[in-house]
Image: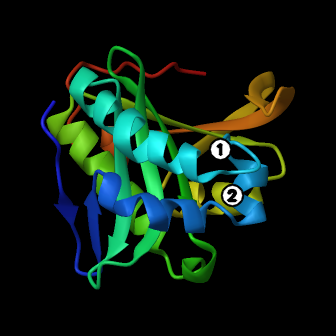
């Protein structure tokens, strides 16, 4: 798939490239990002280079992972967001915010923008969010973006070689007032 740039009044979401390696490296030095995400720890310059020079472009080229840098209109990196294809019509979202930009709603705004794009342009009918139980900041973003928390999956994520329980939630096109690509028949109690 061709790279996509999405904009809001406050943000520019675009794939990161080699010109962003230093900013990605600096942001990922935050202990919170290293604790709650699957980025390597310690996070080295070569990790950032591999991410911006290979992982992101390869994901877009293969249509398997759509990674957006979340930039302020000034050009400063405020966060990162990725949508990874898990099965036909389903993508999993992951995100982090740079420490100095937390609490301003940037990641919620980016999440809604990227999900609208996925629902209308990428053939996605379900976006799943997963976070290790205890990652309250991630859960707050998901809930503010309209995700329905569906429960806890035991031993469902691996972070730095340790299996952990995770929360799981979903966002559907109908949650944003958008049509699905396929009919949806919810279960009835």
Mark 1 — residue?
A: 39
Residue 160: percent from the left, percent from the top? 80, 34
Q: Residue at x 51, y 19 (%)?
A: 187
Side (left or right) of 43 relative to 183: right
Q: Helix or strand or loop: what does disc 2 sit on?
A: helix
Question: What colouring method underlies this structural image?
Answer: rainbow
Q: Residue at x 43, y 58 (%)?
A: 21
Specify whether residue 112 is in view. Answer: no
Rounded to the nearest angstrom, the CA distance separating label 1 from label 2 is 8 Å
Mark 1 or mark 2: name the one nearer the start of the chain: 2
Judging depth in this view, the residue of 162 and 94 nearest the camera is 162
Residue 58: percent from the left, percent from the top? 31, 28
Q: Is residue 152 above or below residue 45?
A: above
Within 10 angstroms of label 1, few (less than 14), some, or many (20 or more) residues? Answer: some
Q: Is residue 168 above or below residue 186?
A: below
Judging depth in this view, the residue of 140 and 180 nearest the camera is 140
Mark 2 — residue?
A: 33
Judging depth in this view, the residue of 85 and 40 nearest the camera is 40
As drawn, which residue projects farthest toward the top?
Answer: 88
Q: Residue at x 29, y 85 (%)?
A: 74
Side (left or right) of 81 relative to 99: left
Within 10 angstroms of label 2, few (less than 14), some, or many (20 or more) residues? Answer: many
Residue 114: percent from the left, percent from the top? 31, 51
Q: Residue at x 23, y 72 (%)?
A: 8
Residue 139, which numbered label? Answer: none
Specify whether residue 136 is in view. Answer: yes
Q: Are marks 1 and 2 in contact (CB under 8 Å)?
A: yes
């Amino acid at each position: 798939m061709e790279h996509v740039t999405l904009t809001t009044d406050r943000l520019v979401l675009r794939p990161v490239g080699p010109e962003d390696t230093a900013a990605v490296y600096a942001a990922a030095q935050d202990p919170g990002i290293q604790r709650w995400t699957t980025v390597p720890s310690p996070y080295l310059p070569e990790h950032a280079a591999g991410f911006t020079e290979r992982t992101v472009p390869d994901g877009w080229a293969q249509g398997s992972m759509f990674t957006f840098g979340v930039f302020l209109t000034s050009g400063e990196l405020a966060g990162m967001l990725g949508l990874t294809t898990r099965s036909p019509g389903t993508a999993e979202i992951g995100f982090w915010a740079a420490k100095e930009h937390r609490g301003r709603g940037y990641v919620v705004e980016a999440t809604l923008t990227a999900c609208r794009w996925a629902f209308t342009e990428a053939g996605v009918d379900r976006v799943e969010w997963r976070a290790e139980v205890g990652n309250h900041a991630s859960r707050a973003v998901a809930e503010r973006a309209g995700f329905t928390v569906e429960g806890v999956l035991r031993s469902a994520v691996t972070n730095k070689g340790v299996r952990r329980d995770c929360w799981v939630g979903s966002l559907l096109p109908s949650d944003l007032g958008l049509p699905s690509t396929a009919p949806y028949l919810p279960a009835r109690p």
